[in-house]
């Protein structure tokens, strides 16, 4: 059975994407970004660190921000879900 997002999922995801765009995390430290994101009510999930790729979580959350990290710095953000 495929998980269906709640009715307000797209609205919440858009808020998360707007926050990420305004914060401009690429090039910032993972610690700095994680502290700021958590203070704003978001969850940060590292999907890759220094070339090692990790699995995605199966439960959808519009407040989750997926990031790639290299040498302690955010190199990219990916689908917010």
Image (tube, rainbow, N blue to C red):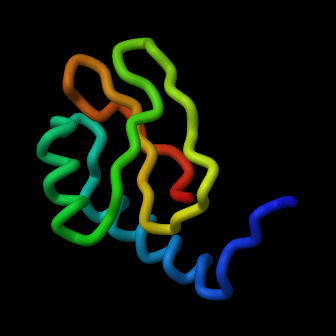
Image position of 44 with respect to 41: above or below: above
Report whether 27 appears left or right of 75.
left
Q: Give the x, y percent position of residue 9.
A: 60, 78
User: What residue appears at the point 52 percent right and 64 percent down from the top-left corner?
Assistant: 61
Q: Give the x, y percent position of residue 80.
A: 52, 57
Quarter-of-image position of residue 64:
bottom left
In the image as oriented, which residue stretches furthest toward the front? 1
Q: Nearer the viewer, residue 24 or 74?
A: 74
User: What residue appears at the point 61 percent right and 77 percent down from the top-left corner?
Assistant: 10
In the image as oriented, which residue stretches furthest toward the top? 51
Image position of 7 with respect to 28: above or below: below
Quarter-of-image position of residue 51:
top left
The total number of labels drawn is 0
User: What residue appears at the point 36 percent right and 60 percent down from the top-left corner?
Assistant: 21
Q: Nearer the viewer, residue 6 or 65?
A: 6
Image position of 42 with respect to 34: above or below: below
Pick the quarter of the image with the N terminus: bottom right
Q: Give the x, y percent position of residue 31.
A: 14, 40
Pick the quarter of the image with the C terminus: bottom right
User: What residue appears at the point 36 percent right and 21 percent down from the top-left corner?
Assistant: 49
Q: Nearer the viewer, residue 56 or 72?
A: 56
Q: Give the x, y percent position of residue 57.
A: 56, 45
In the image as oriented, which residue stretches furthest toward the right? 1
In the image as oriented, which residue stretches furthest toward the bottom? 7
Image position of 76 with respect to 22: above or below: above
């Amino acid at each position: 059975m495929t998980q269906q997002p709640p009715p307000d999922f797209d609205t919440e995801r858009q808020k998360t994407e707007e926050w990420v765009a305004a914060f401009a995390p690429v090039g910032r430290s993972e610690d700095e970004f994680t502290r700021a994101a958590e203070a704003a009510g978001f969850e940060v999930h590292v999907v890759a660190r220094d070339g090692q790729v990790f699995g995605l979580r199966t439960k959808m959350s519009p407040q989750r921000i997926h990031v790639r990290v290299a040498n302690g710095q955010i190199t990219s953000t990916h689908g917010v879900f």
